[in-house]
Amino acid sequence: MTTETTAPSRWTHQLFTRVRAADAARPWLWDGALTSFWTVAALVDASGGWRNVARDPSVPTGLVVVLSLALSLPLYARRRRPTTVLAVMAVAAFVSEASGAFLQAAYLQVFPLFHIALARPPRRLLWAFALLVVPVVTGALRFDGGSWHIHVTSALWAYVFVALAGITVRSRRDHTASLVERARRLEVERDQEVRLAAAAERARIAREMHDIIGHNLSVITGLADGGRYAAAKSPERAAQALDAIGTTSRQALDELRRLLGVLSAPDDAPAAARAPQPTLEDLGSLLAGVREAGLPVVSDLPAPLPPLPPGAQLTVYRVVQESLTNTLKHAGPGATATVRLVAEEDAVRVTVTDTGTPSAAVPAGQGQGLAGMRERAALYDGTLDCGPLPSGAGWQVRLRIPTASVPASAPEDSRP
């Protein structure tokens, strides 16, 4: 039942779609065909049929032919210049009505009227009706006597219906164009959101890769240097350094695999399938690895550790990791470091201080690591400051994260 009622409608829609496409591709063809058809019809009427409705059948045939051509040939330009076409046809219609010929070709004025309603400002319709009414009223008053209003009313109703048809088509066309434009804007906005999300994801991955690779390579470098010096005097220490290098390398590979595994996992993968990221509980193993790399670290961590969202704990871990990595890279030989974590009533404060040479440290605000730390802190409404100590010897990183900070824009707890 449904198929029978919708199939003709679908066929009709496809037909009109093809006609519109052909018209848009070759408008001159359709304009020429329509103009030729109505010109032939008007000339056929001029051969004698016009006398059936004429008020004065004695009007010269030559004048009737000229008026018929004036009422039909301008139709070719009706879409490009509808107002001009209507003005030319209105003059011919006025002569037709005033002379008593009453040519039926005068009704061809509905074509430019339709296009005025379809494509021109609404105020143009007032001028169009003025051009249409004058000839009709002139002929009715001159030849119809007391029944003049019948002729005027029937003609005006025809013109009103045509104008309403043009307005209706125009409204539907404008509505369709509005929907298309809205769909285009939504598509552009979605593309922008996708690009922004991709850029944010790339930045997040870059931070994680920097933290994982930079820290572990710094630790491995320190262990390798220590093992080289110990090889001649203490082979046991050198073997321990090699063992620590292997352990650190495996840890780095595990973290990279975890990161890449999250990236390759489908969006609907269960959270359990995603390996957890470092938390405050892992700070002890982080400090132990740094000590093995040759950097003495003193830690002051509260017990129990303060409760923070997993994402905020990852931020604290990465900031401590990056700070100690910078110390390994830039503080120079003989430097020491202190890591202090304080749980306040409304925030957690982390301070990482080293005794290195400030001139060898990375200036504040420069480097991928410092920028990444600030981005992580801002994600949880936190603040991060870093710079040389007032005494002139040493470097300090200060992080503050509110304990009630759980931003909607933060990454998922199970993600890197």
Image: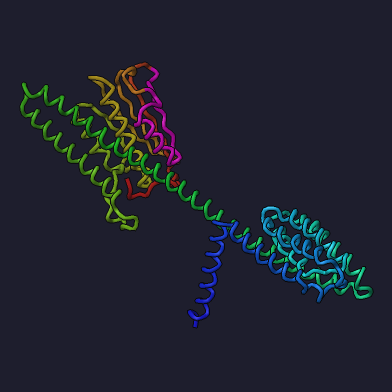
The figure's colour scheme reads: rainbow
* Residue at the (54%, 72%) spot, across then down: 12
Q: Is 126 displayed left or right of 416 in the figure?
A: right
387 up-or-down from 342: above or below:
above
Where is residue 291 drawn, in percent x and y?
A: 21, 30
Task: Give the magenta part as a residue range.
Answer: 363-390
| Residue in the foreground of this view, choosing between 85 and 305 | 85
Q: Is 312 displayed left or right of 135 in the figure?
A: left
| Residue in the foreground of this view, choosing between 400 and 189 | 189
Name the image quarter holding residue 381: top left
Name the image quarter holding residue 397: top left
* Residue at the (32%, 34%) spot, across then down: 320
Q: Is 386 displayed left or right of 329 in the figure?
A: right
| Residue in the foreground of this view, choosing between 336 and 251 | 251
* Residue at the (10%, 23%) spot, across then down: 230
Q: Residue furthest bottom?
A: 1
Where is residue 410 drawn, in percent x and y?
A: 41, 46
Q: Is residue 287 magenta?
A: no
Q: Is 72 displayed left or right of 211 in the figure?
A: right
327 up-or-down from 26: above or below:
above
Name the image quarter holding residue 127: bottom right
Q: Please say whether residue 137 is visible from this viewpoint.
A: no
Where is residue 122 drawn, in percent x and y?
A: 75, 56
| Residue in the foreground of this view, choosing between 351 and 69 | 69
Where is residue 90 drawn, in percent x and y?
A: 80, 59
For the C terminus, the quadrant is top left
Q: Please say whether residue 124 is visible from this viewpoint.
A: yes
Q: How many marks?
A: 0
Q: Is residue 383 magenta?
A: yes
